[in-house]
Image (spheres, grey):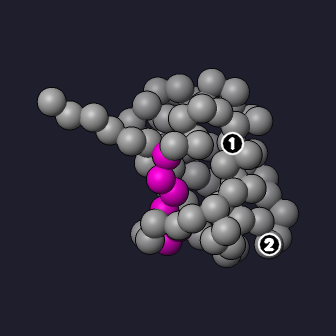
Amino acid sequence: MRVWLFARARDLVGAAAAEIDLPPGATVGDLRRRLGQRYPALAGLVEVSAVAVNNDYADDATPLPPEAEVALLPPVSGG
């Protein structure tokens, strides 16, 4: 599954997207754990980031359908 990364997440991974292998029936929570395992520098940020699945914000219980478009959206600050 390709996960599109934005802002600080993109900087920490060094790429615009991450490829993550997940079993059928995986949820957004499973995705967060797998991202944190694969990219330890991202572990803290992934827990506070929003996740969008097929252009809708999703909580950790949301199942990830095959071929879903997934984005990790870290919090931003302005000033």
Compared to residue 66, the image places residue 19 above or below, namely: above
Asked if residue 77 shows in the view, the reply is yes
Compared to residue 44, the image places residue 32 above or below, namely: below
Mark closest to the chain's N terminus, 1 or 2: 2
The residue depicted at 32 percent of the width and 38 percent of the height is 76
- Percent x, y of residue 9: 49, 35
Q: Nearer the viewer, residue 32 or 65?
A: 32
The residue that disc 2 covers is 25
- Percent x, y of residue 31: 69, 53
Compared to residue 67, the image places residue 12 above or below, namely: above
59 drawn magenta: no
Q: Would you say 33 lies left or right of 68 here?
A: right
The residue depicted at 39 percent of the width and 36 percent of the height is 7
Give the residue type at disc 2: Gly
Q: Which residues are magenta?
A: 49-54
Q: Quadrant of the C terminus?
A: top left
- Percent x, y of residue 10: 48, 34
The residue carrying pointer 1 sits among few (fewer than 14), some (14 to 19) or many (20 or more) residues within 10 Å by Cα, namely: many
Q: Quadrant of the N terminus?
A: bottom right
Compared to residue 40, the image places residue 28 above or below, namely: below
The residue carrying pointer 2 sits among few (fewer than 14), some (14 to 19) or many (20 or more) residues within 10 Å by Cα, namely: few
Q: Residue furthest left?
A: 79
Indicate the secondary structure of the residue bearing disc 2: loop
The overriding secondary structure of the stretch rendered in magenta is strand
The residue that disc 1 covers is 35
Asked if residue 19 shows in the view, the reply is no
Q: Nearer the viewer, residue 15 or 59?
A: 59
Question: Quadrant location of residue 69?
Answer: bottom right
Q: Give me the C-alpha separation between circle 1 and circle 2.
A: 17 Å
Give the residue type at disc 1: Leu
